[in-house]
Image (cartoon, rainbow, N blue to C red):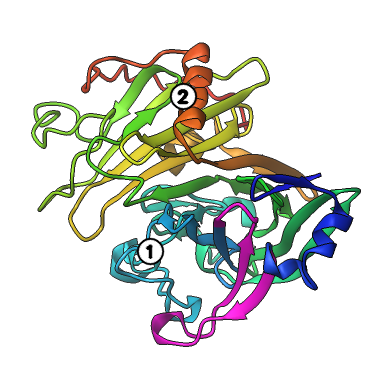
Amino acid sequence: MVTLYGQTLTRREIAERSGSLGQFAGVRLMELSDGVERGIRMLEFRSGTGLRFTVLVDRAMDIADCEYRGQAIGWHSPAGFRHPSLHEYEGEGGLAWARSFSGLMVTCGLDHILFMNEVPADTYVYGPKQTVSHSLHGRVGTIPARLSGYGERWDGDRCILWAEGIVQQSAVFGEDLHLVRRIEIEMGTNDIRLTDRVVNHGFYRTPHMYCYHINVSYPLLDEGARYLAPIEEVVWAAHAGEDYQRQGVGYRTAPAPQTDFHEQVWQHELVADPDGEVSVALVNDRIGLGFEVVTRKDQFPCLYEWQNYQAGQYALGIEPATHHVLGNLAARERGEMIWLAHGEERRYDTVMRILPDTAAIADAEARIRAVSGQPDEDYPEPSGNHRPLGPGSA
Protein backbone atom coordinates (compact mmCIF):
# COMPACT_ATOMS: atom_id res chain seq x y z
CA MET A 1 0.00 0.00 0.00
CA VAL A 2 1.11 3.56 -0.72
CA THR A 3 0.45 6.48 1.59
CA LEU A 4 -0.29 9.63 -0.41
CA TYR A 5 -1.76 12.88 0.86
CA GLY A 6 -3.03 11.31 4.07
CA GLN A 7 -4.66 8.32 2.36
CA THR A 8 -3.49 4.70 2.10
CA LEU A 9 -4.11 3.47 -1.43
CA THR A 10 -3.72 0.29 -3.47
CA ARG A 11 -2.08 0.23 -6.89
CA ARG A 12 -5.54 0.13 -8.50
CA GLU A 13 -6.80 3.07 -6.44
CA ILE A 14 -3.79 5.15 -7.46
CA ALA A 15 -4.39 4.27 -11.13
CA GLU A 16 -8.03 5.29 -10.78
CA ARG A 17 -6.99 8.78 -9.69
CA SER A 18 -4.78 9.65 -12.68
CA GLY A 19 -3.86 8.55 -16.16
CA SER A 20 -0.16 8.58 -15.26
CA LEU A 21 1.80 7.83 -12.09
CA GLY A 22 3.98 10.83 -12.97
CA GLN A 23 1.22 13.08 -11.64
CA PHE A 24 2.23 12.00 -8.13
CA ALA A 25 5.71 10.47 -8.27
CA GLY A 26 8.28 8.94 -10.57
CA VAL A 27 11.72 9.12 -12.16
CA ARG A 28 12.45 11.00 -15.37
CA LEU A 29 15.58 11.61 -17.39
CA MET A 30 16.46 15.13 -18.53
CA GLU A 31 19.51 17.09 -19.60
CA LEU A 32 20.89 20.36 -18.27
CA SER A 33 21.54 22.85 -21.05
CA ASP A 34 23.22 26.04 -19.87
CA GLY A 35 26.45 27.32 -18.36
CA VAL A 36 28.95 24.96 -16.73
CA GLU A 37 26.17 22.36 -16.34
CA ARG A 38 25.47 22.09 -20.07
CA GLY A 39 25.22 18.51 -21.31
CA ILE A 40 24.86 16.74 -17.95
CA ARG A 41 22.20 14.01 -17.89
CA MET A 42 20.07 14.18 -14.76
CA LEU A 43 17.42 11.92 -13.23
CA GLU A 44 14.68 13.60 -11.21
CA PHE A 45 13.04 11.57 -8.44
CA ARG A 46 9.72 12.57 -6.80
CA SER A 47 8.46 10.25 -4.06
CA GLY A 48 4.96 11.72 -3.65
CA THR A 49 5.60 13.11 -0.17
CA GLY A 50 7.00 16.45 -1.31
CA LEU A 51 10.52 14.99 -1.50
CA ARG A 52 12.36 15.74 -4.74
CA PHE A 53 15.99 14.93 -5.51
CA THR A 54 18.12 14.71 -8.63
CA VAL A 55 20.86 12.28 -9.66
CA LEU A 56 23.66 13.46 -11.96
CA VAL A 57 24.23 10.54 -14.32
CA ASP A 58 27.35 12.19 -15.74
CA ARG A 59 28.77 12.95 -12.31
CA ALA A 60 29.12 9.43 -10.85
CA MET A 61 25.34 9.29 -10.25
CA ASP A 62 25.79 11.59 -7.28
CA ILE A 63 22.81 13.38 -5.74
CA ALA A 64 22.66 17.09 -6.58
CA ASP A 65 19.39 18.81 -5.61
CA CYS A 66 17.36 17.68 -2.64
CA GLU A 67 14.31 19.47 -1.29
CA TYR A 68 11.33 18.64 0.86
CA ARG A 69 8.09 20.57 0.35
CA GLY A 70 10.00 23.49 -1.09
CA GLN A 71 12.64 23.53 1.67
CA ALA A 72 16.18 22.94 0.44
CA ILE A 73 18.23 20.14 1.99
CA GLY A 74 21.14 19.73 -0.45
CA TRP A 75 23.94 22.26 -0.82
CA HIS A 76 24.53 24.31 -3.96
CA SER A 77 28.07 25.71 -3.98
CA PRO A 78 29.25 28.63 -6.14
CA ALA A 79 30.97 26.07 -8.41
CA GLY A 80 27.67 24.71 -9.72
CA PHE A 81 27.16 21.23 -11.11
CA ARG A 82 30.08 21.45 -13.48
CA HIS A 83 30.26 19.24 -16.56
CA PRO A 84 33.04 16.63 -16.13
CA SER A 85 34.73 17.68 -19.38
CA LEU A 86 35.61 20.99 -17.71
CA HIS A 87 37.32 19.34 -14.75
CA GLU A 88 41.13 19.40 -14.39
CA TYR A 89 41.96 16.63 -11.97
CA GLU A 90 45.54 17.70 -11.21
CA GLY A 91 44.92 21.44 -11.47
CA GLU A 92 45.88 23.88 -8.71
CA GLY A 93 48.21 21.37 -7.11
CA GLY A 94 45.37 18.90 -6.70
CA LEU A 95 42.85 21.37 -5.24
CA ALA A 96 40.89 21.93 -8.48
CA TRP A 97 38.42 19.33 -7.18
CA ALA A 98 36.86 22.25 -5.29
CA ARG A 99 35.85 23.77 -8.66
CA SER A 100 33.51 20.80 -9.20
CA PHE A 101 32.33 20.46 -5.60
CA SER A 102 28.57 20.89 -5.13
CA GLY A 103 25.45 18.94 -4.26
CA LEU A 104 23.87 16.89 -1.52
CA MET A 105 26.28 14.01 -2.06
CA VAL A 106 29.68 13.88 -3.73
CA THR A 107 31.43 10.50 -3.91
CA CYS A 108 35.15 10.35 -3.06
CA GLY A 109 37.41 7.47 -4.16
CA LEU A 110 37.72 4.90 -5.61
CA ASP A 111 41.40 4.41 -4.76
CA HIS A 112 42.01 7.61 -2.78
CA ILE A 113 40.25 10.01 -0.40
CA LEU A 114 41.31 13.11 1.55
CA PHE A 115 44.24 15.38 0.70
CA MET A 116 46.80 15.06 -2.06
CA ASN A 117 49.32 12.20 -1.95
CA GLU A 118 52.08 10.69 -4.05
CA VAL A 119 51.93 6.95 -3.43
CA PRO A 120 53.84 3.89 -4.69
CA ALA A 121 52.62 2.30 -7.94
CA ASP A 122 54.56 -0.97 -7.64
CA THR A 123 51.43 -3.16 -7.74
CA TYR A 124 50.82 -2.05 -11.35
CA VAL A 125 54.07 -3.70 -12.54
CA TYR A 126 55.05 -0.97 -14.99
CA GLY A 127 58.58 0.39 -14.72
CA PRO A 128 58.01 3.96 -15.96
CA LYS A 129 55.17 4.36 -13.45
CA GLN A 130 56.87 4.57 -10.09
CA THR A 131 54.16 6.55 -8.28
CA VAL A 132 50.51 7.55 -8.55
CA SER A 133 49.66 11.22 -7.99
CA HIS A 134 46.37 11.74 -6.18
CA SER A 135 44.47 15.00 -5.97
CA LEU A 136 41.93 15.93 -3.30
CA HIS A 137 39.33 13.19 -2.73
CA GLY A 138 40.11 11.12 -5.80
CA ARG A 139 38.83 10.85 -9.35
CA VAL A 140 35.45 9.13 -9.27
CA GLY A 141 33.17 12.12 -8.61
CA THR A 142 33.64 13.59 -12.09
CA ILE A 143 33.36 10.38 -14.13
CA PRO A 144 30.15 9.86 -16.15
CA ALA A 145 28.13 6.72 -15.45
CA ARG A 146 26.82 4.23 -17.96
CA LEU A 147 23.09 4.26 -17.15
CA SER A 148 21.85 0.69 -16.80
CA GLY A 149 18.21 1.64 -16.27
CA TYR A 150 15.68 3.60 -14.26
CA GLY A 151 11.95 3.72 -13.63
CA GLU A 152 9.18 2.43 -11.37
CA ARG A 153 8.77 -1.14 -10.14
CA TRP A 154 5.58 -2.40 -8.53
CA ASP A 155 5.77 -5.12 -5.88
CA GLY A 156 2.15 -5.84 -5.15
CA ASP A 157 0.77 -2.53 -3.88
CA ARG A 158 4.23 -1.07 -3.19
CA CYS A 159 5.97 1.07 -5.80
CA ILE A 160 9.76 1.39 -5.87
CA LEU A 161 11.40 4.22 -7.80
CA TRP A 162 14.91 3.23 -8.90
CA ALA A 163 17.97 3.95 -11.01
CA GLU A 164 21.18 2.02 -11.58
CA GLY A 165 24.44 2.73 -13.34
CA ILE A 166 28.11 1.80 -13.57
CA VAL A 167 30.97 4.25 -13.09
CA GLN A 168 34.31 2.99 -14.39
CA GLN A 169 37.59 4.39 -13.05
CA SER A 170 40.23 2.76 -15.21
CA ALA A 171 43.68 3.22 -16.71
CA VAL A 172 46.17 1.17 -18.72
CA PHE A 173 48.93 0.15 -16.24
CA GLY A 174 46.64 1.23 -13.42
CA GLU A 175 43.41 0.62 -11.58
CA ASP A 176 40.25 -0.81 -13.18
CA LEU A 177 37.63 -0.26 -10.50
CA HIS A 178 33.91 -0.26 -11.24
CA LEU A 179 31.32 1.43 -9.03
CA VAL A 180 27.92 -0.22 -9.47
CA ARG A 181 25.38 2.16 -7.93
CA ARG A 182 21.68 1.63 -7.29
CA ILE A 183 19.42 4.33 -5.85
CA GLU A 184 15.90 3.51 -4.64
CA ILE A 185 13.04 5.18 -2.81
CA GLU A 186 9.64 3.70 -2.07
CA MET A 187 6.76 5.86 -3.23
CA GLY A 188 5.12 7.60 -0.28
CA THR A 189 8.28 7.58 1.87
CA ASN A 190 11.22 9.86 2.67
CA ASP A 191 14.04 7.27 2.74
CA ILE A 192 16.60 7.46 -0.09
CA ARG A 193 18.39 4.10 -0.24
CA LEU A 194 21.83 3.90 -1.80
CA THR A 195 23.52 0.57 -2.55
CA ASP A 196 27.07 0.69 -3.94
CA ARG A 197 29.41 -2.09 -4.98
CA VAL A 198 33.02 -1.29 -5.81
CA VAL A 199 34.47 -4.16 -7.87
CA ASN A 200 38.04 -4.71 -9.08
CA HIS A 201 37.50 -5.51 -12.73
CA GLY A 202 41.22 -5.57 -13.43
CA PHE A 203 43.97 -8.05 -12.59
CA TYR A 204 46.32 -5.88 -10.53
CA ARG A 205 46.13 -5.89 -6.76
CA THR A 206 44.47 -2.48 -6.32
CA PRO A 207 44.02 -0.14 -3.34
CA HIS A 208 40.52 1.02 -2.41
CA MET A 209 39.41 3.97 -0.28
CA TYR A 210 35.87 5.38 -0.16
CA CYS A 211 33.94 8.28 1.33
CA TYR A 212 30.65 10.13 0.88
CA HIS A 213 30.73 13.93 1.20
CA ILE A 214 27.07 14.51 2.19
CA ASN A 215 26.40 18.26 2.32
CA VAL A 216 23.40 20.10 3.76
CA SER A 217 22.68 23.81 3.77
CA TYR A 218 20.07 26.50 4.43
CA PRO A 219 17.28 26.45 5.57
CA LEU A 220 17.98 23.12 7.31
CA LEU A 221 21.41 24.40 8.25
CA ASP A 222 20.95 27.65 10.10
CA GLU A 223 21.93 29.31 13.35
CA GLY A 224 21.02 26.93 16.17
CA ALA A 225 20.81 23.75 14.03
CA ARG A 226 21.99 20.76 16.06
CA TYR A 227 24.39 17.95 15.11
CA LEU A 228 23.30 14.61 16.61
CA ALA A 229 25.54 11.53 16.65
CA PRO A 230 26.36 8.59 18.96
CA ILE A 231 29.85 9.92 19.71
CA GLU A 232 32.00 7.78 21.99
CA GLU A 233 34.96 10.13 21.62
CA VAL A 234 36.20 12.95 19.45
CA VAL A 235 39.31 11.50 17.82
CA TRP A 236 40.71 14.46 15.89
CA ALA A 237 40.03 18.07 14.99
CA ALA A 238 42.00 19.83 12.25
CA HIS A 239 41.98 23.09 14.22
CA ALA A 240 42.81 21.62 17.66
CA GLY A 241 45.60 23.17 19.69
CA GLU A 242 46.09 26.82 20.51
CA ASP A 243 43.48 27.86 17.91
CA TYR A 244 40.84 25.32 18.96
CA GLN A 245 38.29 27.94 20.08
CA ARG A 246 39.50 30.88 17.99
CA GLN A 247 36.48 30.89 15.63
CA GLY A 248 34.01 30.34 18.45
CA VAL A 249 32.36 27.36 16.75
CA GLY A 250 32.17 23.95 18.40
CA TYR A 251 31.03 20.67 16.93
CA ARG A 252 27.44 20.63 18.29
CA THR A 253 25.60 23.76 17.15
CA ALA A 254 25.76 25.73 13.92
CA PRO A 255 26.25 29.50 13.84
CA ALA A 256 24.92 31.91 11.22
CA PRO A 257 27.14 32.36 8.14
CA GLN A 258 30.51 33.91 9.00
CA THR A 259 32.93 36.14 7.13
CA ASP A 260 36.44 34.71 6.59
CA PHE A 261 35.55 31.44 8.27
CA HIS A 262 38.17 28.72 7.84
CA GLU A 263 36.74 25.23 7.42
CA GLN A 264 36.78 22.97 10.48
CA VAL A 265 36.92 19.18 10.25
CA TRP A 266 36.40 16.70 13.08
CA GLN A 267 36.70 12.92 13.21
CA HIS A 268 34.34 11.26 15.67
CA GLU A 269 34.40 7.66 16.88
CA LEU A 270 30.76 6.56 16.65
CA VAL A 271 28.92 3.68 18.29
CA ALA A 272 26.78 1.32 16.22
CA ASP A 273 23.38 0.05 17.31
CA PRO A 274 22.76 -3.70 17.84
CA ASP A 275 22.18 -4.11 14.10
CA GLY A 276 25.55 -2.58 13.27
CA GLU A 277 24.09 0.69 11.99
CA VAL A 278 25.27 4.23 12.76
CA SER A 279 22.90 7.20 12.56
CA VAL A 280 23.92 10.86 12.33
CA ALA A 281 21.49 13.75 11.94
CA LEU A 282 21.31 17.50 11.54
CA VAL A 283 18.09 18.96 12.92
CA ASN A 284 16.56 22.42 12.88
CA ASP A 285 14.05 22.77 15.71
CA ARG A 286 12.91 26.22 14.58
CA ILE A 287 11.46 24.96 11.29
CA GLY A 288 10.81 21.38 12.43
CA LEU A 289 13.00 19.74 9.80
CA GLY A 290 15.87 17.27 9.97
CA PHE A 291 18.08 15.04 7.84
CA GLU A 292 19.48 11.68 8.95
CA VAL A 293 22.24 9.55 7.43
CA VAL A 294 22.39 5.84 8.32
CA THR A 295 25.46 3.75 7.46
CA ARG A 296 26.97 0.46 8.59
CA LYS A 297 29.94 0.46 10.96
CA ASP A 298 31.50 -2.56 9.25
CA GLN A 299 31.41 -0.72 5.91
CA PHE A 300 32.21 2.83 7.02
CA PRO A 301 34.11 2.60 10.33
CA CYS A 302 35.09 6.31 10.31
CA LEU A 303 33.11 9.53 10.11
CA TYR A 304 34.12 13.17 9.67
CA GLU A 305 32.10 16.31 10.35
CA TRP A 306 32.90 19.12 7.92
CA GLN A 307 31.97 22.67 8.84
CA ASN A 308 32.13 25.29 6.10
CA TYR A 309 30.27 28.22 7.61
CA GLN A 310 31.83 30.79 5.28
CA ALA A 311 29.27 33.26 3.93
CA GLY A 312 28.35 32.36 0.37
CA GLN A 313 29.45 28.73 0.83
CA TYR A 314 27.44 27.86 3.95
CA ALA A 315 27.39 24.07 4.44
CA LEU A 316 27.80 21.20 6.87
CA GLY A 317 29.14 17.86 5.69
CA ILE A 318 28.49 14.39 7.08
CA GLU A 319 31.29 12.17 5.77
CA PRO A 320 31.24 8.41 6.36
CA ALA A 321 34.57 6.91 5.30
CA THR A 322 36.47 3.65 5.05
CA HIS A 323 39.64 5.13 6.55
CA HIS A 324 40.91 7.54 9.18
CA VAL A 325 41.51 11.19 8.34
CA LEU A 326 45.25 10.39 8.41
CA GLY A 327 45.13 9.66 4.67
CA ASN A 328 46.40 7.30 1.99
CA LEU A 329 50.05 6.88 3.02
CA ALA A 330 49.09 6.39 6.66
CA ALA A 331 46.57 3.71 5.68
CA ARG A 332 49.37 1.85 3.91
CA GLU A 333 51.86 2.30 6.74
CA ARG A 334 49.33 1.16 9.36
CA GLY A 335 48.34 -1.92 7.32
CA GLU A 336 44.80 -0.59 6.93
CA MET A 337 44.60 -0.06 3.18
CA ILE A 338 41.87 -2.12 1.51
CA TRP A 339 43.41 -4.22 -1.29
CA LEU A 340 41.14 -5.76 -3.92
CA ALA A 341 42.21 -8.66 -6.13
CA HIS A 342 40.48 -9.43 -9.41
CA GLY A 343 36.73 -9.91 -8.88
CA GLU A 344 36.80 -8.83 -5.25
CA GLU A 345 34.34 -6.17 -4.18
CA ARG A 346 33.17 -4.00 -1.30
CA ARG A 347 29.51 -3.16 -0.65
CA TYR A 348 28.08 -0.02 0.97
CA ASP A 349 24.46 0.34 2.13
CA THR A 350 23.30 3.81 3.12
CA VAL A 351 19.99 5.50 3.91
CA MET A 352 19.47 9.26 3.70
CA ARG A 353 16.23 10.16 5.45
CA ILE A 354 14.16 13.33 5.71
CA LEU A 355 12.85 14.02 9.21
CA PRO A 356 9.74 15.97 8.22
CA ASP A 357 8.45 17.24 11.58
CA THR A 358 9.14 17.60 15.29
CA ALA A 359 7.87 14.09 16.03
CA ALA A 360 10.31 12.56 13.54
CA ILE A 361 13.14 14.68 14.97
CA ALA A 362 12.31 13.55 18.51
CA ASP A 363 12.21 9.91 17.40
CA ALA A 364 15.59 10.15 15.66
CA GLU A 365 17.17 11.90 18.63
CA ALA A 366 15.83 9.25 21.02
CA ARG A 367 17.18 6.43 18.82
CA ILE A 368 20.61 8.05 18.60
CA ARG A 369 20.77 8.83 22.33
CA ALA A 370 19.76 5.25 23.14
CA VAL A 371 22.90 4.01 21.39
CA SER A 372 25.28 6.55 22.91
CA GLY A 373 25.35 10.07 24.23
CA GLN A 374 27.68 12.71 22.85
CA PRO A 375 30.04 15.15 24.59
CA ASP A 376 28.20 18.03 26.27
CA GLU A 377 31.04 20.49 25.73
CA ASP A 378 31.51 22.25 22.39
CA TYR A 379 35.27 21.64 22.27
CA PRO A 380 36.03 18.10 23.52
CA GLU A 381 39.72 17.37 23.78
CA PRO A 382 40.60 15.12 20.82
CA SER A 383 41.86 11.74 21.97
CA GLY A 384 44.19 11.10 19.01
CA ASN A 385 43.07 7.48 19.27
CA HIS A 386 42.76 6.36 15.66
CA ARG A 387 41.69 2.81 16.39
CA PRO A 388 43.14 -0.01 14.27
CA LEU A 389 40.89 -0.86 11.37
CA GLY A 390 42.37 -4.28 10.68
CA PRO A 391 44.63 -5.46 7.85
CA GLY A 392 43.17 -4.61 4.48
CA SER A 393 39.64 -4.23 5.79
CA ALA A 394 37.13 -1.50 6.47
Relative horizontal placement of residue 100, taking residue 379 as reference (left or right)? right
- Residue 43 falls inside the magenta stretch: yes
Relative horizontal placement of residue 235, taking residue 46 as reference (left or right)? left
Instruction: Name the residue: 49% across, 76% down.
Output: 84
Residue 57 in view:
no
Residue 347 position within the rendered picture, expressed as x and y whole percent measured from the top left: 70, 42
What label sits on residue 344 in the rendered view?
Answer: none
Q: Which residues are magenta?
A: 26-51
What label sits on residue 97 in the rendered view?
Answer: 1
Q: Residues within 10 Å of mark 2 (few under 14, many from 20)?
A: some
Between 2 and 13, the one lying in front of the other is: 13
Instruction: Name the residue: 41% across, 50% down.
Output: 215
Residue 142 position within the rendered picture, expressed as x and y whole percent measured from the top left: 51, 68
Between 315 and 380, the one lying in front of the other is: 315
Q: Residues within 10 Å of mark 1 (few under 14, many from 20)?
A: many
- Residue 351 falls inside the magenta stretch: no
In the image, residue 273 sits, relative to residue 140, either above or below, namely above
Relative horizontal placement of residue 182, taking residue 19 as reference (left or right)? left
Place residue 312 in its image quadrant. Answer: bottom left
Three-letter amino acid code of the residue under disc 1: Trp
Residue 260 position within the rendered picture, expressed as x and y whole percent measured from the top left: 10, 52
Residue identifier under label 2? 362
Between 160 and 347, the one lying in front of the other is: 160
Mark 2 or 1 closer to N-term? Answer: 1
Distance from Cα at disc 2 to Cα at disc 1: 37 Å
In the image, residue 385 sits, relative to residue 343, either above or below, namely above
Identify the element where label 1 is drawn.
Answer: helix
Instruction: Name the residue: 10% across, 31% down.
Output: 243
Q: Residue furthest right?
A: 156
Instruction: Name the residue: 66% across, 64% down.
Output: 167
Residue 41 in view:
yes
